[in-house]
Image (cartoon, helix red, strand yellow):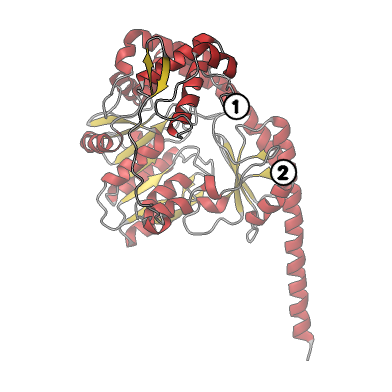
Amino acid sequence: MYQDFKITEGRPVYVQVKEYLKRMVLKGVLQPHQKLPSTRELSELMNVSRNTIISAYIGLEEEGLIYTQKGKGSYISQMVASVAAPLLELNWKERMNSQALLAEEMDLMKHGIRAERGTISFTSIAPNEKLFDLGNVKRAFLDRMAVEGEVLLNYGYAKGYKPLIDFLKHYMEQKGVDLTGKDLLITNGFTEGLDLVLSALTKRSGAVICENPTHHTAIKNLRLHGYEITGIGMERDGINLEQLEQMLSCQSFDCAYFVPSYHNPTGIVMSPQKRLELMKLMTRYQIPVIEDGFNEELRYSGSHVSPLIATAGQGNGVIYLGSFSKVLFPGLRVGWVLADRELIYYLESLKRARSIHTSTLDQSILYQYLLNGNLDKYLRRARTEYKRKYEWTRQCCETYLPYSQLTGDGGLHLFVSFAEGFDTRRLLQLCKQRGVIFTPGDIFHTDETGGETMRLGFSRVSDDNIEAGIKIIGEAAKELLSQQESKIIRHCSQEKTDTITP
């Protein structure tokens, strides 16, 4: 006994000794009123210092697990015996509602392609952690804690941390947004913002219109909220307005969801003229717009394009969902909703009912980091590196892939389309066997199309692996195309033979 104790690095040893002895008490290995070894004896048995044993005994006594008799030693306390209840065994899958079952079905972390060790993975569009500005993040944390540390560790406000709210309002104003009649709510990233908005809106038609393809996380949330999704095809400068108008004229929609900048997954930036025409349509048909401000900051060329909420002027029909997750640090779960003041009033109550508030510590660190002027400096460095990787990835695609279309004007990914009838799921199976994975494009489509498309995330892949991985994808794609052409030739030959044979 006691000699099977092993020390784990990184935790106080006395805590580990206390927890070890506590487990023995709770399991009944040490019986009530049993005398424990002296601190000197136990320190030798467990190969730790005597002071460590003394501290562990003090902790156990504070928890009421042992008691000390002066001059006699330490003993195990009398535990209140628990009466064993009848065994309660339930089939939880049978008790899951349709929302939980659908969420599990659409969970890519569980059902997507897993990267084995050594695999070149193009599935992520998270920022490259090697670019993270750790020094200034630490400085921001220390600066803010020095100012109001006690406040930051207590409960915060559902609406958010006031200094950050004010900073983000100014930030959005610099994007050309008219703040008249608008307010801002802090959320746990983009996803919570979308969930809150969808939870608040009245469901009349139960239908939502969006681009096709579109953000997979948005598709999941829309479906979990019970919406029917209608997707409108994309053109080189954004959504197809002719198709959109035709659909709006024959069906009612509760809201629209758009990703106008560095669209996920196509990477397309909607043109300024198309943004204006889009908002005219939304105004004519009185449809609320949920705008995903995805990756707006990762512009590598061209001039700034104002978000839809800026194009809308003083109108209150656009709900802007913002986040720095793809630009700064996803670990700080901070996003925001900028919308009409009355809508924010209700979203604040929903937020309070569900999660009370977003971590004030996270909000304050982000605020101080921004206040210290670090964002612009970080963005310059990030844009330079991501632009270089973007151009290298594009060059590799043009060199090695037999694609029919390649889109992506910035951001952290490129979208590849092959010839009609091509199957990127089959391509993925081949590539996985050769140590490369990517995201098949059909998961981004609203209507089970897109089987010939794929998304390549390059942000966390080294230059050498970008070239090696895309080369492997290209070789496998050419093999599949060759097989496809052979089948067509055989099919045509057979048809010709059938026609000639009397």
The three-letter amino acid code for the residue at tag 1 is Asp
Pointer 1 residue? 4
Identified at 61% across, 24% down, the residue is: 385
Please say if 204 is above or below 416.
below
The residue nearer to you, when weighing 413 against 78, is: 78
Compute the Cα span from label 2 to label 1: 42 Å
Describe residue 158's horizontal placement relative to residue 368 as left or right. Answer: left
Q: Residue furthest bottom?
A: 502
Please say if 151 is above or below 30.
above
What label sits on residue 435 in the rendered view? 2
Q: Quadrant of residue 350?
A: top left
Would you say the residues marked 2 and 1 are in contact, meaning their CB atoms lie under 8 Å apart?
no
Quick one: SS at disc 1? loop
| Circle 1 Cα neighbour tier, 10 Å, few/some/many (<14 / 14–19 / ≥20) | few
Describe residue 371's horizontal placement relative to residue 430 as left or right. Answer: left
The three-letter amino acid code for the residue at tag 2 is Gly
Question: In this rendering, does residue 236 appear at all?
Answer: no
Describe residue 10's horizontal placement relative to residue 488 as left or right. Answer: left
| Circle 2 Cα neighbour tier, 10 Å, few/some/many (<14 / 14–19 / ≥20) | some
Give percent across and percent down for residue 212. Answer: 47, 52
> Which of the two labelled residues, at mark 2 and mark 1, occupies the earlier sequence position?
1
Identified at 29% across, 46% down, the residue is: 199
Camera-nearest label, 2 or 1: 1
Please say if 167 is above or below 498.
above
Question: In this rendering, does residue 107 appear at all?
Answer: yes
Give percent across and percent down for residue 416. Answer: 62, 47
**Can you say which quadrant of the picture contains the C terminus?**
bottom right
The residue nearer to you, when weighing 318 against 200, is: 200
Describe residue 473's horizontal placement relative to residue 285 as left or right. Answer: right
**Can you say which quadrant of the picture contains the N terminus?**
top right
Please say if 462 is above or below 491.
above
Give percent across and percent down for residue 331. Answer: 47, 28
